Image: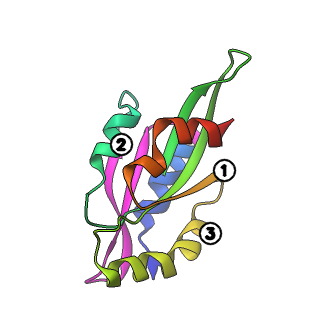
Amino acid sequence: MSVHDECKLRYLDLKAKRNYRFIIFKIEETIQQVVVEKLGQPDESYDDFSSSLPDDECRYVYDFDFITNENCQKSKIFFIAWSPDTSRVRSKMVYASSKDGFKRELDGTQVELQATEPSEMSIDIVKSRAM
């Protein structure tokens, strides 16, 4: 599975410049390539991110800002592999087999999370994994 150059460029923008709150990547099966589906603007929230994920299709990064127990502002880049139970079996297999290679292209993700339903990537779970 190849990765479109735009994926790498937008990820570098997120990582270095914090231009985006999140990026949603999808595999375009007709061309066998990972492409950018949506760029979340800096003022968008975690709810905006989670509501952007389709209910029945797999997707792959969320830049999570949070306040530590010491009242410090921090940020971590999450690699979230969204693979809902309702997605097609073939789609789940393609995303699962492509995940590690794609993740290697995105140098600097700090936390990985696999989710098959919204409760597995709730804001509380994300916060606990970030700390």
Q: Quadrant of residue 49?
A: top left
Q: Which mark is residue 104?
A: 3
Label 2 – label 3 distance at C-alpha = 22 Å
The magenta stretch spans residue 23 = yes
Q: Earlier in the sequence, mark 3 or mark 1?
A: 3
Residue 53, above or below 123: below
Q: Quadrant of residue 25?
A: bottom left
Q: Earlier in the sequence, mark 1 or mark 2?
A: 2
Would you call the spot at circle 1 few (<14 residues within 10 Å), some (14-19), or many (20 or more)? few
Label 3 – label 1 distance at C-alpha = 12 Å
Q: Which residues are magenta?
A: 16-39
Q: Name the secondary structure under disc 3.
A: helix
Label 1 – label 2 distance at C-alpha = 18 Å
| Residue under pointer 1 | 110
Q: Amino acid at mark 1?
A: Gln
Q: Quarter of the image for the N terminus: give it.
A: bottom left
Point out residue 29 in the picture as x, y percentages from the top left corner: 29, 81
Q: Name the secondary structure under disc 1.
A: loop
Question: Mark 2 or 3, which is nearer the eye?
Answer: 2
Q: Which mark is residue 49?
A: 2
Would you call the spot at circle 3 few (<14 residues within 10 Å), some (14-19), or many (20 or more)? few
Give the total number of marks visible in the rendering. Answer: 3
Q: Amino acid at mark 3?
A: Arg
Q: Is residue 17 visible?
A: no
Point out residue 38 in the picture as x, y percentages from the top left corner: 31, 51
Q: Amino acid at mark 2?
A: Phe
Would you call the spot at circle 2 few (<14 residues within 10 Å), some (14-19), or many (20 or more)? some
Q: Is residue 104 left or right of residue 21?
A: right
Q: Name the secondary structure under disc 2.
A: helix
